[in-house]
Image (tube, rainbow, N blue to C red):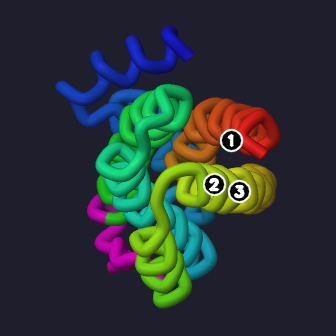
Amino acid sequence: MKVYLLILGAALGTPWILAAQSNGASGNAKNGSKASAQLSAKGQQFLSKIASEDQSEINLAMLALQKTKNNQVKTYARTEILAADAPMEQGAKVIAEKYKAAITVKPSESDTNEYNRLSGLSGKAFNQAYMKYESSQQAKDLQLVGREETAARNRKLRNYVRYEYLPVTSATQSARELSKSIG
């Protein structure tokens, strides 16, 4: 995780998605591969869904920092969500902008309902509900990322998904473990 955060910190100063693909665009032009040079409708849907979910998780992590007194929950919110999801959301936006694809970053209605539900909780009830939700949501995100890794035809999108796989895996494991320990 520390290596990821170091790479991420350095990457925030540069357009990391594009830098990681310095050979991608020229290679595609030489090979004439239109599949890699375009963003499919499914790729656009993936970026929209992941950016929306990242924004929802950021909102919930900020709520957790306000509501909880549990240091483990605070650490999870800071390191697994806030330190990772904002840059991942930005990465989705960079790819979408590159391909002039409109993506939604607004949390879904169900995510907004979950935020409202958690807002009404406090103490141990909040910690348990937040970590149970995160455990479930991170597992879904990991499946989503895994499916997109094999489905993505666009090289930049595929590399973005591969880059995102590590922090989503880490958040999934941390959320699962913390949810179990909190009860």
Mark 3 is surrounded, within 10 Å at the Cα level, by few (under 14), some (14 to 19) or many (20 or more) other residues, namely some
Element type at mark 1: helix
Q: Is residue 86 above or below residue 101?
A: above
Q: Give how far across and how far down residue 39 sits, in percent.
A: 50, 68
Give the Cα separation between the discs numbered 1 and 2. Answer: 6 Å
Residue 175: give its label.
1
Residue receiving disc 2? 134
Which contiguous range is marked in magenta?
Answer: 97-108
Near-viewer residue (137 or 105): 137
Element type at mark 3: helix
Which residue is drawn at the image coordinates 39% and 12% (left, top)? Answer: 6
The quarter in which the N terminus is drawn is top right
Which residue is drawn at the image coordinates 71% and 56% (left, top)? Answer: 132
Q: Earlier in the sequence, mark 1 or mark 2?
A: 2
Residue 47: give its label.
none
Residue receiving disc 3? 132
Q: Give how far across and how far down residue 56 sits, in percent.
A: 43, 66
- State yes or no: residue 176 in magenta: no
Instruction: Answer whether labels 2 and 3 touch (C-beta < 8 Å).
Output: yes
The reply to whether residue 38 is in sight is no
Identify the amino acid type marked 1: Ala
Q: Main secondary structure of the magenta part?
A: loop
Classify residue 159 as left or right of residue 179: left
Q: Give how far across and how far down residue 104 sits, in percent.
A: 37, 78
Classify residue 101 as left or right of residue 136: left
Instruction: Answer whether labels 1 and 2 touch (C-beta < 8 Å).
Output: yes
Give the Cα separation between the discs numbered 2 and 3. Answer: 5 Å
Which dot, 2 or 3, sits closer to the camera? 3
Identify the amino acid type marked 3: Lys
